Amino acid sequence: MSSFVSASTVLPAHREPITLTTADGITLVGELAVPADRPPQATLICFHPLPTHGGSMDSHLFRKAAWRLPAQAGLAVLRFNSRGTSSPEGTSGGQFSAGGAEKYDLNAALEFATKRFLPRLWLVGWSFGTDVVLLYGCQPGVEGALLLSPPLARADDVELTAWGSSGKQVTVMVPEFDDYLRPAEARQRFSLVPQARVIGVEGAHHLWVGEKYVTQVLNQMMECAVPGLNRAAPAPAR
């Protein structure tokens, strides 16, 4: 397999349309991508940006994670549309709840992963998805969280303190030019999570546009889930 990966590269994997059923009776559409030739080493469960601003399971970082990481790192990638969200993959039932009833969506994803015996669960939130992860994801069976562009709009010091007390691994990637929370403030806010690693990403913006930044994010997903993975970093597209 060539080490060159372009923005549109889709690497081999077994990709399966799935449905999640929440405790309050909502059906969510999603996809599970796993390695084509081996059991997964770890699992990424993805929580997308605001659906009211175009966020979905098909937001580009999560789509590309599902396209690449099963083959590159032996990871399972579980992504889904939260309630009231539509994308090319389909439309989930229910209505957007601004971070309230989305706790049932997160729980449904964890239940699915457990029933499918998916290993070593990592929660990956992006923008609004980081609030869902911080609010509801500090649960038994979750190894840690990767937070991309966290606005900290709904989660507050109570949730940050709970994550800090849990000892679970937390990595935070903050764009230099983020619209909501920039690296210096993020380091101050996440001081309540002593084990958190806050990574400021030079030149990046909230939506991580550009293959250079996509590669940095996907590499961090791999490093969180499979620390020290021996891999050749793909060349960024130009």
Image (tube, rainbow, N blue to C red):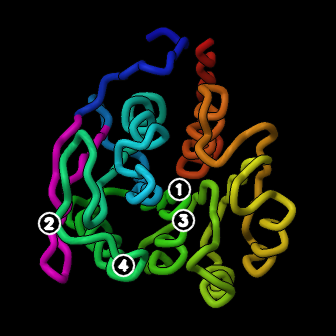
Q: Name the residue located 33 percent from the left edge and 51 percent from the top edge.
A: 79
Occupied quadrant, residue 95: bottom left
Q: Position of residue 226 (x, y in %)?
A: 55, 46
Q: Which residue position is annotated with label 3?
A: 130
- Earlier in the chain: of badge 4 and badge 2, it is 2
The local secondary structure at tag 3 comes to helix
Q: Name the residue located 30 percent from the left edge and 40 percent from the top edge.
A: 34
Picture quarter with the C terminus = top right
Marks 3 & 1, CB-CB < 8 Å contact = yes
In the image, residue 103 sits, relative to residue 21, either above or below, namely: below
On residue 103, which mark appears? 4
Nearer to us in this view, 95 or 194: 95
The local secondary structure at tag 2 comes to strand
**CA–CA distance between discs 4 and 3?**
12 Å
Crowdedness of circle 4 by 10 Å Cα count: few (<14), some, many (20+)?
some
> Is residue 31 inside the magenta stretch?
yes
Report the amino acid beneath label 1. Answer: Trp
On residue 58, which mark appears? none
**CA–CA distance between discs 4 and 1?**
16 Å
The local secondary structure at tag 4 comes to helix
On residue 126, which mark appears? 1
- Earlier in the chain: of badge 3 and badge 2, it is 2
Crowdedness of circle 1 by 10 Å Cα count: few (<14), some, many (20+)?
many
Report the amino acid beneath label 3. Answer: Thr
In the image, residue 130 sits, relative to residue 103, either above or below, namely: above
**CA–CA distance between discs 4 and 2?**
14 Å
On residue 27, which mark appears? 2
Nearer to us in this view, 171 or 173: 173
Marks 3 & 2, CB-CB < 8 Å contact = no
Left or right: where does residue 121 sit relative to residue 231?
Answer: left
